[in-house]
Image (tube, rainbow, N blue to C red):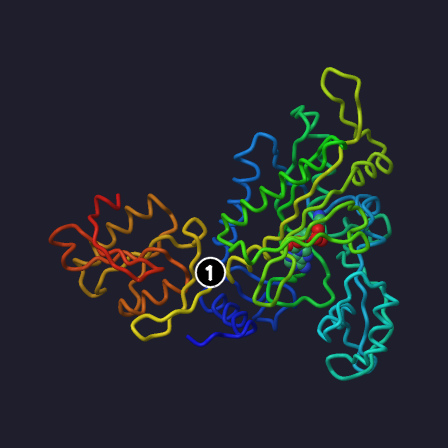
Amino acid sequence: MAKQSKNEKMENIVSLAKRRGFIYPGSDVYGGLSGTWDYGPLGVTLKRNIMNLWWKMFVEDREDMFGVDAAILMNQKVWQASGHVDTFVDPLCEDTLNHRRFRTDHILKDAGVDAEGMTMAQMDEAIETNGIKSPDGNPLSKSRTFNMMFETHVGATHDERSVSYLRPETAQGIFTNYKNVVDSFYPDLPFGLAQQGKAFRNEISPRDFIFRSREFEQMEIEYFVDPGEWEASFDALLKDIYAYLEALGLPLENIHELEVPAEDRAHYSKRTIDIEYDFPIGKEELLGLAYRTDFDLGNIQRVGGRGMEYTIKGTNTKFIPHVIEPSFGVERALMAVLSAAYTEDEVNGEKRVVMKFPEHLAPVKYAVSPLLKNKPELVEKAREVYSILKKKHGAVMWDDNGNIGKRYRRQDEIGTPYCVVIDFDTLEDDTVTIRYRDTTEQTRCSISELR
Ligand code: GAP
């Protein structure tokens, strides 16, 4: 098969995602809303499977993790104390003629200049010395900072005191509940609190499909440790991250670790490893693992006035625990899963597109079809098989649309591992054909075996 370019692969995935009911552009019928995406019937299941697997591996299967689900709207003091009000900013520059706005580091990156570690003044200088223009060919303004939090007001008055924000990370809802969980469960250190949920960032230039969205989901853990022992937990969590990425079916050779240099780390971090992935758009950040020290609990104690110290049981030893934070973005995990699964091959001389999802992630596990939909005896028998599988697996699709070849192609495109076909032999001997997605091989098995 001719090798496709990376952009072509991305475009094919975006188009398949829309055509087959995984992901649609947000508010499409009204002309769209940039940076927002809606999940269709298959997308919502795939996304849930990715999130549920994470919850199982990081929370349910472990003794040292506790789940929480905090409110999205929080007291404005949370974001003042965390530093987001002052420092959660991106550099923004403007086309001086048509006033379109861009992220300065993205403008540089698109022009082949790596802006990692540059100050805003250095970025402006790089634009000037390289003669970089806006995508519309016009001169660019000097940069200024732009805060990415979506501001809103809570209650009927619109004044400074009613200001709140749509949370830009789920982490703060974990920190604000740290003491509640300690008081309810008395966990021994080290232990973690985990949360999944929406986060919002007013990205200057959302792009690359769901990779950089304005509304997205995070799966975050704040893992509380004795400050003298943070390194062991950091290393252990890094291993756990790899186990999860393997369970997502992501090839190890596409996963890379970036030790983030001090000048590029978030204001709260003493060590950060970005896990990068070879997406079709290039090597980009998939998730982060950061050592946040006692920055957040220390801030809560200082600004909120509540004691955040942990007392080691049976002793007088007290300290504010330090924190290791694995922070996953669901959309990025989903985009990695889609790109790892997307495969083009040839079957009997015909091009085929197949999504080779790991079986436990596939939104549909079985498709059940009568060979001919106008033969009531086949339909009746197929309905019987469908009910058996549906009761057992839930994620089973009835498919009698078009001829059998077309059904197979459609099921390949949505990544269904098994197609079960009921034909005239079924009526004689109670066996069905099972057709395997990855090999296209077909075998017969009895209905009782399916049971
Ligand atoms: N609590 C730490 C934190 O939020 P971050 O590196 O800003 O750290 C963590 O974000 C993860 O959230 C990223 O690695 C990425 O997976 C995801 N993420 C961040 N911004 C995103 C966006 N605009 N669209 C989609 N995912 C995003």
Closer to the camera, 20 or 157?
A: 20
For label 1, the SS is helix
Q: Is residue 20 left or right of residue 350?
A: right
Q: Is residue 365 left or right of residue 254?
A: left
Q: Residue furthest toward the top? A: 314
Quadrant in the rendering for residue 175: top right
Residue 354 visible, this angle: yes
Q: Is residue 55 left or right of residue 194?
A: left
In the rendered structure, which amino acid carries the disc numbered 1? Ala
Closer to the camera, 370 or 154?
A: 370
Residue 130 x, y percent position in the rendering:
81, 78
Residue 159 x, y percent position in the rendering:
86, 52
Tell me how many marks there are.
Answer: 1
The residue depicted at 67 percent of the width and 23 percent of the height is 186
**For ligand 1, which image quadrant applies?**
bottom right
Residue 247 x, y percent position in the rendering:
49, 48
Residue 363 x, y percent position in the rendering:
43, 54
The residue depicted at 85 percent of the width and 33 percent of the height is 305
Q: Is residue 270 above or below residue 379?
A: above
Q: Is residue 359 above or below residue 56?
A: below
Image quadrant occupied by the N terminus: bottom left
Quadrant in the rendering for residue 132: bottom right
Q: Residue furthest toward the front? A: 253
Q: Is residue 161 left or right of residue 212?
A: right
Q: Residues within 10 Å of mark 1 (few under 14, many from 20)?
A: some
Image quadrant occupied by the C terminus: top left
Mark 1 lies on residue: 341
The residue depicted at 74 percent of the width and 66 percent of the height is 204
The residue depicted at 50 percent of the width and 60 percent of the height is 340
